[in-house]
Image (tube, rainbow, N blue to C red):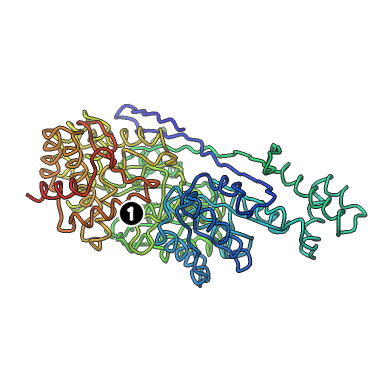
Amino acid sequence: MARVIRVVTPASSSPVVLGRLAAHNEAEWRLAVVPGLLDPDNRALLGHLAGVRRVLVVAGAPERERLVRYLDRQQAGGLLDGYCLAPEAKLVAASPLSAIAGLADAAVTSGLGRRDAILVYGHDSEVLTAVATAALLRRQTMAVQVVSDLPALLAAVRTAASVPLPGPFAVRRQQVTVVVDEDVLLAAACTPEEEAALEELATMDSGVAEALLGSPLEGEALTAVRRAALAAMFRWFGRAWTTRSARYAGAPTGRAVSYQVEAVHDVFRTTSRPDGRGQRDTADTEPGAGRLAEWLPRGGRVLAVVDAYAPRIVDDVRRYLSSCQERSLIAGFEIFCVESSPAVKTLGRLDRLVRTADRMDFGPTDVLLGVGGGTVLDLVGTAALMYRGGTPYLRVPTTLVGMIDAGIGLKVAVNVGTRKNLLGGYHAPLACLCDPAFLATLPSQEVRCGLAEAIKIAMVTDGELFGLIERHHESVLTRRQSPESRRVMEGAIAAMLGELSTNPFERELRRLPDFGHEYGHLLEAESGYRLRHGEAVSIGMALASQLAVLAGRLSPSVHERMIRLLNRVGLPTFDRLCEPERLWRWLCVDIKSHKGGVPVLVAPTGTGAGGFLEPDDGLTFDTVRRACAELRA
């Protein structure tokens, strides 16, 4: 749960704090020891899979055969819809990101949805790739790890919080389930690796040390030592208890996150101002620039990732950071230029950015700074998420979409092939600093796309904001700063933060901010990015709204009011890609898997109110066909 506070200070002060989001990200670690784990009639493993209907299996040859027999039996009994064996070639790649991308692609191709799981057996490099993939896939997919020896268990416990990958990459985990195959563990002969693991455990736990003292590592004595080692593992995880089928321990944990969204002016201005004695104060700057300096690491370094859509922006950032370095506010900086396009949010560009931070020997006192639109901010956030398991970063959005949508949430992600936002996570920035002056640098199409996001959140959450956009959208389109355009921007930010506060980590997959995005993301990618993000979302809103009318959930007059506003802003409400067969396939496959196995769309139920459309509401192929016909007319 999160809380959001909207604080607007007087216009004469700086900064204006538009909102703060504070949340606690709960993580859950589970450990179980199960006898007869893969016996066909033992349902314990299915229990730890928590009711998922489909799994992707990553395991070596001997374990794979046992898992296949077990899963075949569960599928035959109707307890599982299906499973897929991960292609071994997907796990062997030139880089860790390539291996993760290959496995993620295999998972999605096999039909794995957001409420399904990756099942792994063992603890080797392929298994590490698999659990890292699960932590990143759609920002969190369940992973259940089965181990059958103490070295593997010890390694699994060590990587429970963060999965190390080759190079400077590490992935934090929010959900960890480790299941010990007890029969195999107790029956195997002791190996040199297990002896070393026991000796290490003995240095950390008196129970293991006592059991190991003078005991031959064979027969019943070995069994006693192994049980003492398992007990030590339970003590590490927290409370322990015994049930009929398994000994189990769970330890919920988590971390607090908070950040604020501020409106600042001339964020990269470096002109100094007089102090109280009439002298120039070389340690301070104008209010906006000074506010950014407060967020920069005193004595640390900055890696600034800047959208080079306008050379002046890059020059301003370089001049500003040079000034900060001259004043000893920061120790140094480097600028990483990108040009905003779908090619920016790729694993290749992510790899380059993370390795640049590594070359700079980035540490906990250094900061990544993202300056650009939503695409650039997503790239920077994902790099911050994955660089050694998490590093601080700042957002300075330069587009309206970035200021009211992409820049103020917790989630970050990159694309994999044509699949948008397939890999990512939740990583809060230190702050998001919004400078409305950037709007004057944007082409009109970008401002229209930003208004699409404002209309989206207003239509399903805030009728007053919707009316404000109706009255003043032309002021926003002029790209000049005005009280009206500021009110639209601030209202959209407040509405978005309000929605994020109730579900910041997307535990609930039904989210009103997804209005227009279910079809929008797919249209955007299918068009080869001919459609801009805001244009695709606009079409997605029109489709969902028309379907709500046909389902009797929305008044035709309210739908027509929204369509008129989209048209007046200059946004499309239909595209040649909107073929009923394609839209229905997307709903039944892509959207269904993304929504946890239910084909559901966010739809308005009034001006400023939203709900959800499902098949039970009359969401059928025929209604999709009729919606396309109405919008095409």
Q: Position of residue 285 (x, y in %)?
A: 39, 42
Residue assigned mark 1: 590
Residue 203, given in percent of the width and then of the height, sits at 82, 51
88 left or right, relative to 29: left
Amino acid type of the residue tagged 1 in the rendering = Asp
* Residue situated furthest left in the rendering: 633
Element on which disc 1 rests: helix
Q: Is residue 128 visible?
A: no
Q: Is residue 26 left or right of residue 632?
A: right
Residue situated in front as seen by the camera: 209 or 581: 581
Residue situated in front as seen by the camera: 132 or 543: 543
Front in this rendered view, residue 575 or 342: 575
Left or right placement of residue 587 versus residue 59 in this view: left
Q: What percent of the width, then of the height, locates residue 230? A: 75, 48
Q: How many marks?
A: 1
Question: From where the camera sits, is residue 596 visible?
Answer: yes
Res 494 → quadrant: top left
For image coordinates 36% across by 57% down, the residue present is 306
Counting from the top left corner in percent of width and height, residue 162 is at 59, 52
In front: 12, or 54? 54
Q: Specify the farthest residue to the right.
A: 214
Q: Residue at x 38, y 47 (%)?
A: 597
Q: Is residue 579 left or right of residue 601?
A: left
Mark 1 surroundings within 10 Å by alpha-carbon count, few (fewer than 14), some (14 through 19), many (20 or more): some
